[in-house]
Amino acid sequence: MKREIPKDLVKFLKPYDKKVAETALLLRDFVIGQHPDCNELIYDNHNAVAIGYSTTDRQKELYCHIAVYTKYVNIGFNKGTQLDDPKGLLKGTGNSFRHVTVDNFSEFPEKYVKGLLKQAYKLSIDTLENKEQKIKGQSIIKSVSSTKKRPS
C-alpha cells in the first residue's frame, strides 16, 4: 500500500545522494506495504534521518526502523536480538537492536526480511500494555535536530 510521502521527509532526504534517498523510500514502501496501519515516527537527527514504525505514537514501542546514513540505509529491528534469524543476516552488537544494511535495493533480501518484520510486529503487539491501536496509519514528525553531522 502506498502512503503519501510527508513533505518534511522529502526535505530531510533531499541532501542525500539520490540512490540513498530512493533506497530509503523503497524500504519505507516495503514496511508500510506489510503493515498499512503502522504509524511512522520521523526523526531528522544529528547523524541520520530515522523513520520508526510503531503500532502507537511512542518511540519505546517501535518494532522496526529505517536509518538513512550518508552512503547506505539500514533497516533495523528494535528487539532484533529476540528474532529468529537462521541466515544470520542481522548485524549489531548491542543488547537489543539488530539491522540489515541495504546498499542496493535490487539486492535486498525482501522475502527473508518480510519474515523478520512479521516476527518483530508480532513481538511488538504481544508486549503492548494497551493493545487497542488508537492512532493508525499516521506519519508524525517527532524531532528535528538543529545541528547535522551528515548531509544537510
Image (cartoon, rainbow, N blue to C red):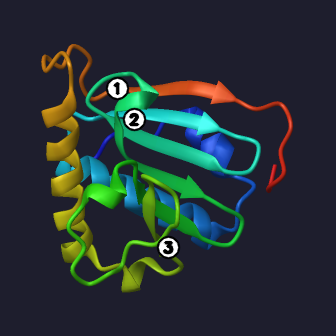
Earlier in the chain: of badge 1 and badge 2, it is: 2
Q: Which mark is residue 127?
A: none
* Residue lying at 60% horizontally and 57% vertically, measured from the top left: 68
Disc 3 crowd rating (10 Å Cα; few below 14, some 14-19, many 20+) is some
Element assignment for label 1: loop
Q: Amino acid at mark 2?
A: Glu
Name the side, left or right, on which 39 lies relative to 51: left
Name which of mark 2 and mark 3 comes first in the sequence.
2
Residue for point 84% across, 51% down: 149
CA gap, disc 2 and disc 3? 20 Å
Query: What residue does disc 2 label?
Result: 40
Determine whether label 1 and label 2 are within 8 Å by CB. Answer: yes
Amino acid type of disc 3?
Thr
Using the image, determine if residue 122 lies above or below residue 95: above
Residue 56: name its quadrant. Answer: top left
Query: Secondary structure beneath disc 2?
Result: strand
In percent of width and height, residue 66 lies at 47, 53
Q: Gap between marks 1 and 3, in whole Å? A: 26 Å
Disc with the residue nearer the chain's start (1 vs 3): 3
Image position, residue 59 (x, y; %): 45, 29
Q: Could you say where residue 145 lies in the image, as x and y percent from the top left?
A: 76, 32
Residue ID for mark 3: 101
Q: Is residue 104 left or right of residue 12?
A: left
For image coordinates 70% across by 29% down, the residue present is 144
- Residue 1 appears anywhere in the view: no
* Near-viewer residue (95 or 5): 95
Answer whether residue 119 is visible to the viewer in this image. Answer: yes
Neighbours of disc 1 within 10 Å: few (<14), some (14-19), many (20+): some
Where 25 sits versus 71, above or below?
above
Judging by the rendered image, the residue that carries numbered circle 1 is 138
Depth check, front residue: 52 or 127: 127
